[in-house]
Image (cartoon, helix red, strand yellow):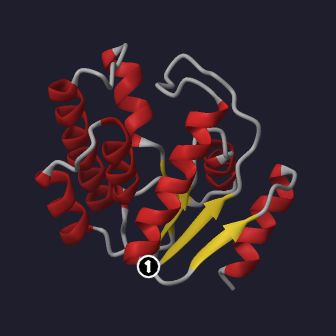
Amino acid sequence: MAKIVLTGGPSSGKTSLIEELSSMGHSVIPEVAKDLILKIGNLDPRDKVSYAKFQEDVALEQIRREEELYKGQITFLDRGLYDGIAYSQKYLGFVPEALSASARKHSGYERIFVLDRLPFVKENFRIENGEAEAAELHHRIVKVYSNYYKNLERVPVLPIKDRLNYVLEKLK
C-alpha cells in the first residue's frame, strides 16, 4: 500500500485532517517537528547550529516513525521529510547534508496532498511570525515537493469533513 503525505504551510489544517483520519481508524504519523518543539521548548531558527541539528533530529525521528509504523497499509503522514528541506532553506539558507541525504534515501511517498492554506493561527509551538511568513513557507514547501514529485494533489479549503472525503475519494 502507501505512505500518503499531507503537507502545506503553517495553518493549512494538516493536523486537523490527520486527527480525523486517526479517529476513523486510519494509520497516521503525527507531525514530528511539532512533537519535538513541544518537548524541547522554545526553538529559535536564528540559532543556525541548533536549528540545523533540530532539522536533522526531525528527519531521524520521521524515518524512525515511518519504519516503525508503516506496515504496508495506507499510512497518512502529517508532513514528510521534504518539509524539513523547505524549512531549512527558509531559516538556514541551506539544507543540512544529513537531511538532504535522508530525504533522498528514505521517503518513498506514494501520494502528496498539499492542503490549501487557511487563515494563519499563532500557536505556542510555531516559529513563524505571521501570515506573510506562513505564505512563504507554503510556497517553499510546494516548490520542494514539486522538485521530487510530479503530481502534487491540491486539497481546497473546505469544511474538515469535506476535506477528509476529498482526500479519501482521490485515493480510490
Picture residue at 43% right of the left edge, 79% below the top: 149
Looking at the rendered image, the quarter that the C terminus falls into is bottom right
Q: Is residue 42 visible?
A: yes
Q: Is residue 77 visible?
A: no
Q: Secondary structure at mark 1?
A: loop
* Image vertical order of residue 45 relative to residue 144, above or below: above
Which image quarter: residue 90?
Answer: top left
Picture residue at 33% right of the left edge, 47% below the top: 89
Using residue 114 as the reference point, say whether residue 109 is left or right of it.
left
* Image vertical order of residue 133 relative to residue 40, above or below: below
Picture residue at 46% right of the left edge, 25% below the top: 127
Asked whether 154 or 88 is in front, the reply is: 88
Asked whether 99 or 170 is in front, the reply is: 99
Q: Position of residue 156 (x, y in %)?
A: 78, 62
Q: How many marks?
A: 1
Asked whether 143 or 77 is in front, the reply is: 143
Which image quarter: residue 97?
Answer: bottom left
* Image vertical order of residue 19 relative to residue 129, above or below: below
Picture residue at 44% right of the left edge, 32% below the top: 34
Using residue 145 as the reference point, say whether residue 23 is left or right of it.
right
Using residue 29 as the reference point, say whether residue 19 is left or right of it.
right
* Residue identified by numbered label 1: 149
- Mark 1 surroundings: few (<14), some (14-19) or many (≥20) residues within 10 A: few
